[in-house]
Amino acid sequence: MESGFSSSMEDYLEAILLLSEHDGAVRITDIAEKLSIAKPSVTAAVNVLKEKGLVTQKRYGRVYLTPEGIAQAQRVKGRHRVLRTFLVEVLGVAADTAEKDACAIEHVISAETMERLIAFLERSLSEPDSLLR
């Protein structure tokens, strides 16, 4: 885990980012539904994210990512996207399985491995025949 955050905190950041892409703010209820987690647990996690300066929230209000929160969430989302692409496009893993696996792997993959995976995908997907070698 390159970010220094727990995998669950990364999941919260990614969920808030995805949910906020619609109107910029997210309700605790929305996060709870997306992650299938109880609202009190989400509230506790949001409080930790607030302490770390990654989100802002007025009492009982909507949750907003700070610029640092956005940056962290985008890193997680990017790793997830690259891993899912690799699993589906290169290994032929079913999309639903790839989604779950990418979510698990994104938290533990090293920066070096991620960089090499991105380079591999850029070469391979720009040269489709190379995937068969």
Image (tube, rainbow, N blue to C red):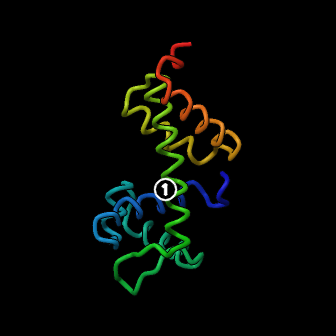
In the depicted structure, whether residue 30 falls above or below residue 59: above
Q: Quadrant of the C terminus?
A: top right
Q: Nearer the viewer, residue 2 or 132?
A: 132
| Residue on which disc 1 sits | 11
Position of residue 82 measured from the top left corner of the image (x, y, whole percent): 51, 41
Furthest residue to the left?
A: 22
Percent across and percent down for residue 57 are 42, 81
Total numbered circles: 1
Residue located 63% across and 42% down the image = 114
Q: Residues within 10 Å of mark 1 (few under 14, many from 20)?
A: many
User: Taking 73 as reference, is 21 left or right?
Assistant: left
Q: Is residue 95 left or right of residue 84?
A: left
> Is 56 drawn above or below residue 39 in the view shown?
below
User: Which x, y percent locates residue 6?
Assistant: 61, 58
Residue at point 48%, 29% (across, down): 125
Q: Nearer the viewer, residue 121 or 31?
A: 121
- Residue 97's image quarter? top left
Q: Amino acid at mark 1?
A: Asp
Nearest the eye: 43 or 102: 102
Q: Residue at x 43, y 29 (%)?
A: 88
Q: Is residue 81 above or below residue 77?
A: above
Q: Residue farthest to the bottom?
A: 59
Q: Secondary structure at mark 1?
A: helix
Please, which residue is most extreme toward the right here?
112
Q: Which residue is pictured at 42% across the width and 38% down the height?
A: 99
For this orientation, the residue located farthest to the front is: 127
